[in-house]
Amino acid sequence: MRKLKPRVRSFAQVTWSGSASRAPHPESWVRILDPDKVPLASLAALAASSRLPSLPPNPPQAPLLTSLLAWAQRIPRPSPPAPDSQTGRPQPPRAPPTAAAHTNESAVPGLQSRRYKERVGRGVGIKRKGSRAGTTAREGRGLAGEGEPGRSGRLRRGPTLFLQGGGGAVGVPGAPGSGGRLWRLTATAMAAAAGGAAAGAVRSLSRFRGCLAGALLGDCVGAVYEAHDDVTMASVLSHVSSLEPEPGAKGSARTEALYYTDDTAMTRALVQSLLAKEAFDEVDMAKRFAQEYKKDPDRGYGAAVITVFKKLLNPKCMDVFEPARAQFNGKGSYGNGGAMRVAGISLAYSNTQDVQKFARLSAQLTHASSLGFNGAILQALAVHLALQGESSREWFLQQLLDHMEEVESDDRSLSEARELGMGERPYSSKLKKIGEFLEQGLMAKEEVLSELGNGIAAFESVPTAIYCFLRCMAPDPAIPATFNSLQRTLIYSISLGGDTDTIATMAGAIAGAYYGMEQVPESWQQSCEGYEETDVLARSLHQLFSKDL
């Protein structure tokens, strides 16, 4: 690693690439002096007053950056080049190694496996529509590089820190665009210092388990009221009281488990596919969706998606995206089915661009309208942000709005929204309305339903779920204080009526990822069908995600 030039009073910008922040905050600039001349202790003291742009407000900065500097201190620094034996002058630096030379195959999970080599060798790709004439483009799924995300579904395990200085990115020798001066730092050491309160570290096991458990609770508890528009708070409170344990007992007082619906069935199928392939694999995922329906069709699947599953089960189906594209005269569905099951994507991928990309592709297996898959993207981003730890409601909402304004800016999204008479960027508009609601305090149920909705369309349920989560960060006088924030989120979302199981499962996934498993009551969890299998899936996904860190 080359030393900085004498003009070392350059700036270093700390960018957290696994976060939702897309633009560095002005206060994130920290003056870094030559580490060979300034003690690390001084750097740590200086860094303690800095502010990381992509972390929520008021993080424990000092321990975080001290951990980073302690990590850097353990890196052996190369000795200066020996002088030339004939001239006595220092030898010129060697040229940066090529990408092939510096590739560390042992650091890439599965790179040496036969399955991976066969996949790359065959050029297995995603068949997708390439033009209006119906041609198809084949996109190879090689291993994504460090630059722009490729077409790969290979899991990127863990957010990454890049220190960018005056001479460009400082990083792993030979990394694309680094000029041979890049340190690639995984966030494992920093996560323990920067994690949230009860849930522990960023993207911790507690958050993974809480996410899937919260989704299961929302589905099972909310299914009782599905399609009911006259749900009262008193009725919901009476219902959840049956989940509480008997005096002196630990388990639920219920004698029968609450059954899960298609929401959980498809969520589990998505996670099982990610675990089996260690990646997003559209063919495997589509096959699992269809087979899950065939195995247990009485979970409340909609008629439209059943048509998709039947086509996917046909051996002649060569393009797994085609059945969804053919729905509704070629316009596709804009229901919330893609969003209700998407939480596993946010757990598997830590990079924001990957979360958006694979949320979209996973949703397009059944919901081809942009209003459908954009809802899945929004839900996946909400879970992704919740996994990062404590944040203010304003920060959380602004991050979502920044991303969705960009997501909804493509021509297809704009035109399809206009066709439905919704105006441009319907999701962004509803996020702004959520901001207004939060500023005004606790809004009446009628106002929430009028502006946000509680229907089966993604744009009438995903923003509603996000509002439920953000609203219930604060106490609600209508909900007893004995319930924690996660319970409060589920109770309120179900009280809105309509598509209660799906709105509650989405709100539960966000809240569970944010608060962690510590807020999942044991008695509530044990009241739900399949809670043990769900917890195993969460643990397995976290183990896969973190095994190479």
Image (tube, helix red, strand yellow):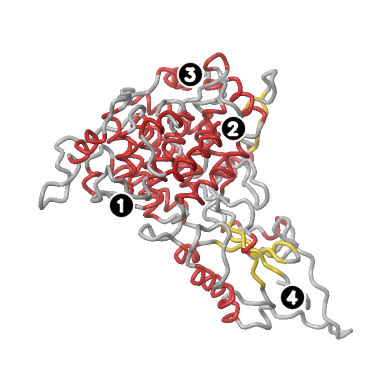
Q: Which residue is at a point 48% across and 22% down the rendered structure image?
A: 312
3D distance between C-alphas at marks 2 and 1: 34 Å
Residue 515 in view (yes/no): yes
Residue pointed to by mark 2: 425
* Whether residue 324 is situated above or below residue 448 in the rendered picture: above
Q: Secondary structure at mark 1?
A: helix
Q: Earlier in the sequence, mark 2 or mark 3?
A: 3
Residue depth check, mark 3 versus mark 4: number of the one nearer the observer: 4
* Amino acid type assigned to the residue bearing label 1 in the image: Gln
* Amino acid type assigned to the residue bearing label 4 in the image: Val
Residue 115 in view (yes/no): no
3D distance between C-alphas at marks 4 and 1: 48 Å
Pointers 1 and 3 in contact (C-beta within 8 Å): no
Q: Secondary structure at mark 4?
A: loop
3D distance between C-alphas at marks 2 and 3: 32 Å
Q: Earlier in the sequence, mark 1 or mark 3?
A: 3
Pointers 4 and 1 in contact (C-beta within 8 Å): no
Mark 3 crowdedness (10 Å alpha carbons): few <14, some 14-19, many ≥20: some
Q: Which mark is residue 8?
A: 4
Q: Which residue is at a point 52% across and 50% down the rendered structure image?
A: 350
Q: Secondary structure at mark 3?
A: helix
Residue pointed to by mark 3: 311
Q: Secondary structure at mark 2?
A: loop
Question: Viewed as shown, does residue 178 lie left or right of 39?
Answer: right
Q: Quadrant of residue 272?
A: top left
